[in-house]
Image: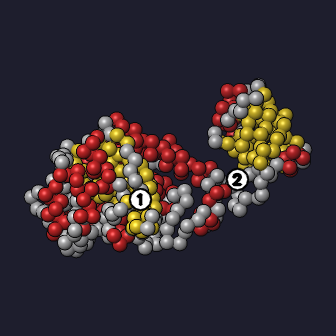
Amino acid sequence: MHRILSNQLPAHVGETVTVAGWVHRRRVLANVAFVIVRDRGGLLQVVTRQETGEAAKEEQVVEVTGRVVANEVAPGGVELVEPVFTVLGPAEPPPVELFRPELKASLPVLLDHAAVTLRHPARQRVFAASASAVGAFRAALDRQGFTEVFTPKIVGTATESGANVFRLDYFGGAAYLAQSPQFYKQTMVGVFERVYEVGPVFRAEPHDTARHLATYTSLDAELGFVRDHRDVMAVLTEVIRAMVGAVQRFGYTASMPVDVPVLHFREALKIAGAHEDEPDLAPEHERALGEWAATTHGSDFVFVEGYPMRKRPFYTHPQPDDPRWSNSFDLLFRGVELVTGGQRLHRHADYLAALARLEQDPEPLRTYLEAFRHGMPPHGGFAIGLERFMARMTGAANVRETTLFPRDLHRLAP
């Protein structure tokens, strides 16, 4: 008999159907038992004999054939009666009570037993929303003529800093896990003009905070023929708006006005109460700017543009009228940096000059620089951290709550 999902049962009232899933909860009374079964569609109630309910173990995988009847107090307004149970997979008691509306276990317990705790509906909802956000990212860029690309994650040159990379033995030579697809996505602008990628990036940064991970999912985009970084910000705004909209159906919301407020770095320092010589925004400055955006503009988002060139990668385009500042930006979401982006250099000579100022040998970057020797348009791009986006959307206190299997200074399992 064809398997029916729990959320399809209302269309089969009066019929005999077969369902399958996990025993989510059981309630055994004197003469009857109620067994709640969980599948990918949701929850369904099975009314059975007392002895059958006692035999049903939580997280046991079962197949149930029974008759669908209406019951407005049951999940979905229907239930299965006169059931026949078949155990497909036996189960030991789970380490946490998954039938509870909320998981009360500590974060280390949730992560240590992720294989089981991820089954909880609330945990499922986070990652279903995350998948929807990625789908919206792709769809928004597809509509704007972008092409998805897939770039190497083992590279011969550190993208941003040689101090924060994972080094590999690559057949007896040195290689690294990619910190970002930056070099490749710029190169691909010379092929498709507009590209994006969804993939893992790796950062060997010794941070042990609630917002940092050693590997996370980066949503990258790069586009050619821009006038400056503002064109990149416009594309990013539409992408973020689509992602926010996609996760709203899961109950997560954020305020994003038509015009997201934009501050120059100098103005941002003043609003945050920071010293005018600060080279970057500290977490407390970002929080202050988030509060300012919410209070002044009713926005959970705020752009900060014009970061000092000394704090940006060598490929960043300077502000034309004052090269101390850059044509780059960060997008803050509820007081936390979510996105970094900007306009890049696009002339080969400018790259050589930038590397010379840093006293950096261009030879290790030879294959990357080749694209700029053969004509590249003005271009720019951005990168969104998926797990951090979801942490801000869900209100999670720690980015590990929105990461399937986190990797950090202390965690390499499960």
In the picture provided, is 102 more to the left or to the right than 218?
right
Total marks drawn? Answer: 2
Residue 368 visible in the shown view: yes
Numbered label attached to residue 154: 1
In the picture provided, is 76 more to the left or to the right than 35?
left
Q: Which residue is mark 2?
A: 99
Q: Quadrant of the C terminus?
A: bottom right
Q: Quadrant of the N terminus?
A: top right
Residue 378 visible in the shown view: no
Asked which colour scheme the image uses, the reply is secondary structure
**Label 1 amino acid?**
Ile
Q: Camera-side residue: 135 or 11?
A: 135
**Label 2 amino acid?**
Phe
Between discs 2 and 1, the one toward the N terminus = 2
- Between the C-alphas of marks 2 and 1, the distance is 42 Å
Q: Camera-side residue: 150 or 10?
A: 150
